[in-house]
């Protein structure tokens, strides 16, 4: 796919475009329909995991026709290296009590699954009425813990990707497409 939509300053860092903004939009239409059906008659609290999930949160919430509330959490995962440490720290907690509510964690990507595993266990202890996960991307080949991810946008191979909220060292989040970086950029 062409790199025409990548801003010139980033173009040399990109190996290939994995998912275009248009492909993401089409997939989100289908996911939102599925969630609307599954949650018909219920209110849903979306919990976005900062910062990678911001665009997914915005684009998903605007497609849903059920009543949604939004809250955000931030966890430390791995600074500027590219693999999970397994140690998760909450940097920003929820504003609201989730007891008795229908809750969906909105995540950018599930890689080892360690971050999400921690989050699910943490939120489950707060006694929501239900708890599911929506993730835009998963890398099944890298999974270290078995976790149920109810709504998945795309399964991708084991490549380091950025764009649509995903970063490397806080760069590239604003790209509209999801792209694989050249390995020399992230030094794998
Ligand atoms: P996990 O704990 O290994 O599942 O890592 C999850 C977190 O790592 C995600 O929420 C992302 O912030 C980050 N991450 C994992 N893979 C990638 C990637 O390919 N690009 C950018 N960030 C990633
Ligand atoms: Mg993240």
Image (cartoon, rainbow, N blue to C red):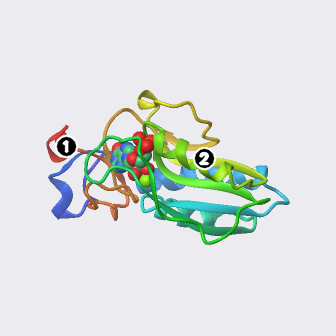
Q: Is residue 56 left or right of residue 41?
A: left
Residue shown at 20%/45% (left/top)? 186
Relative to the observer, which residue lies in front, 22 or 181? 181
Q: Residue 182 has which mark?
A: 1
Where's residue 130, x and y in %? 75, 50
Q: Is mark 1 within 8 Å of ligand 1?
A: no
Alpha carbon distance from label 1 to label 2: 32 Å
Residue 151, image quadrant = top right
| Nearer to us: label 1 or label 2 | 2
Q: Quadrant of the C terminus?
A: top left
Q: Is residue 50 left or right of residue 66?
A: left
Residue most toward the bottom? 95
Q: Residues within 10 Å of mark 1 (few under 14, many from 20)?
A: some
Residue shown at 75%/60% (left/top)? 99
Q: Residue 39 has which mark?
A: none
**Labels 1 and 2: the sequence-earlier one:** 2
Where's residue 105, x and y in %? 60, 54
Question: Disc 1 on helix, strand or loop?
Answer: loop
Q: Is residue 36 visible?
A: yes
Q: Is mark 2 within 8 Å of ligand 1?
A: no
Residue most toward the top? 141
145 is higher (above) or lower (below) than 153: above
Q: Residue 120 has which mark?
A: 2
Question: Disc 2 on helix, strand or loop?
Answer: helix
> Contact (CB < 8 A) between labels 1 and 2?
no
115 is higher (above) or lower (below) than 69: above
Residue 163, image quadrant = bottom left
Q: Is residue 103 left or right of residue 12?
A: right
Where's residue 4, x and y in %? 25, 57
């Amino acid at each position: 796919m062409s790199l025409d939509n990548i801003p010139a300053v980033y173009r040399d860092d990109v190996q290939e475009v994995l998912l275009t903004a248009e492909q993401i939009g089409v997939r989100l239409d289908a996911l939102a329909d599925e969630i609307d059906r599954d949650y018909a008659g219920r209110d849903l609290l979306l919990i976005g995991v900062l910062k990678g999930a911001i665009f997914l949160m915005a684009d998903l919430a605007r497609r849903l026709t059920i009543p949604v509330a939004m809250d955000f959490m931030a966890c430390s995962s791995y600074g500027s290296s590219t693999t999970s440490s397994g140690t998760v720290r909450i940097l920003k907690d929820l504003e609201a009590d989730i007891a008795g509510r229908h809750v969906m964690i909105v995540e950018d990507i599930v890689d080892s699954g360690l971050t999400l595993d921690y989050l699910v266990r943490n939120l489950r202890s707060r006694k929501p009425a239900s708890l599911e996960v929506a993730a835009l991307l998963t890398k099944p080949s890298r999974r270290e813990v078995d976790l149920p991810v109810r709504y998945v946008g795309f399964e991708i191979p084991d490549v380091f990707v950025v764009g649509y909220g995903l970063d490397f060292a806080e760069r590239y989040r604003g790209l509209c497409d999801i792209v694989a970086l050249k390995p020399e950029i992230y030094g794998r």
